[in-house]
Amino acid sequence: MKQLRHYIRRILIEKIQAEDFEDVMQTAQLAHLGQKRRDGSDYIMHPVAVQAITKRHYPENFAAQILALLHDAIEDGPSADLPEEELRQMIRGSITDPRDLEQIEIALDMMTHDKSAVPNYEDYLASVFSNPLASIVKISDLIHNLSHNPSERQIIKYRTALEKVPIPGNIASSHIAELMNILEK
C-alpha cells in the first residue's frame, strides 16, 4: 500500500510539473514576443537553449529548468504591452508548488541584472553565484552565450569575471567542464 501511494504521488507530481512547464513556456514566449537576438533569431530560442543545457546537466532539477526558461524574462521581457508586474503575475500563476515558486522568484530576481544598481559585472556574478539555483542557470546561460555567436567583448567580460569569481561548489563537474571547454577555445 505504501509503495502504491508513493507511486501515485510521483505520478501526480510529474503531471503537475509537466503542466507547470507548459505554462512557464507560454509565459516565456509572451515575455520575449517579437524580440530578436543579435543574429536575428527569435529571442525565445535563447531561454529554450539554456533550459536544454540545464536539463542535460540536472535532469531532475525541475526548478532550475523552469528558471532557465524565465531567466531573462524580467530583465528583457517587460514592455508597454506586458508591464513587469503583469509579467510577474503570469510567472506566479504558472508555477503550482509554492516552494518552487518562492525559490524561483528569489533566483530570478538575483539573475535580473540592474546595471544601474550593480554596474560591475563581477559583483553581479558573485551575487548570482551565491544562490544555488541561480548559479546553475547562470552557468548554462554563459555556455549558450559563449557558444552562440559571442562578441569579442562578451568573451573577455565573461572570462575576466570567471577568473575573479569562483564557480560555486553546487555546480556539476560536467557543467563546469562544458563551460571551460568553450572558454579555452
Image (cartoon, helix red, strand yellow):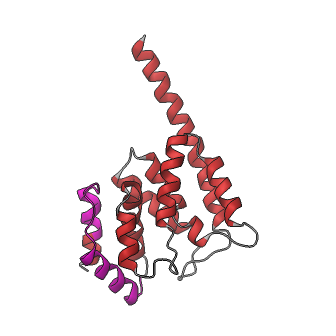
Left or right placement of residue 25 versus residue 150 in this view: right
Rendered location of residue 119, percent (x, y)? 45, 82
Q: Quadrant of the N terminus?
A: top left
130 and 62: which is toward the camera: 130
* Residue in the image at 27% along x and 65% along y: 167
Residue 18 lies in the magenta-colored region: no
Rendered location of residue 98, percent (x, y)? 55, 41
Q: Compared to 2, does 47 lie above or below?
A: below
What span is colored magenta in the figure?
150-179
159 and 169: which is toward the camera: 169
Q: Compared to 183, does 70 lie above or below?
A: above
Q: Can residue 147 be seen in this view?
A: no
Main secondary structure found in the magenta portion: helix
User: Which of the 4 image quarters holds residue 134?
Assistant: bottom left
Q: Compared to 38, does 137 lie above or below?
A: above
Q: Which residue lies furthest to the bottom in this view?
A: 152
Left or right placement of residue 78 versus residue 180 in this view: right
40 and 169: which is toward the camera: 169
* Residue in the image at 53% along x and 83% along y: 38
Q: In which quarter of the image is the C terminus?
A: bottom left
Rendered location of residue 178, percent (x, y)? 28, 66
Q: Can residue 143 be seen in this view?
A: yes
27 and 135: which is toward the camera: 135
Q: Residue furthest right?
A: 81
Rendered location of residue 144, percent (x, y)? 41, 70
* Residue in the image at 40% along x and 47% along y: 61
Residue 151 lies in the magenta-colored region: yes
* Residue in the image at 38% along x and 47% along y: 59
Q: How many marks overall? A: 0
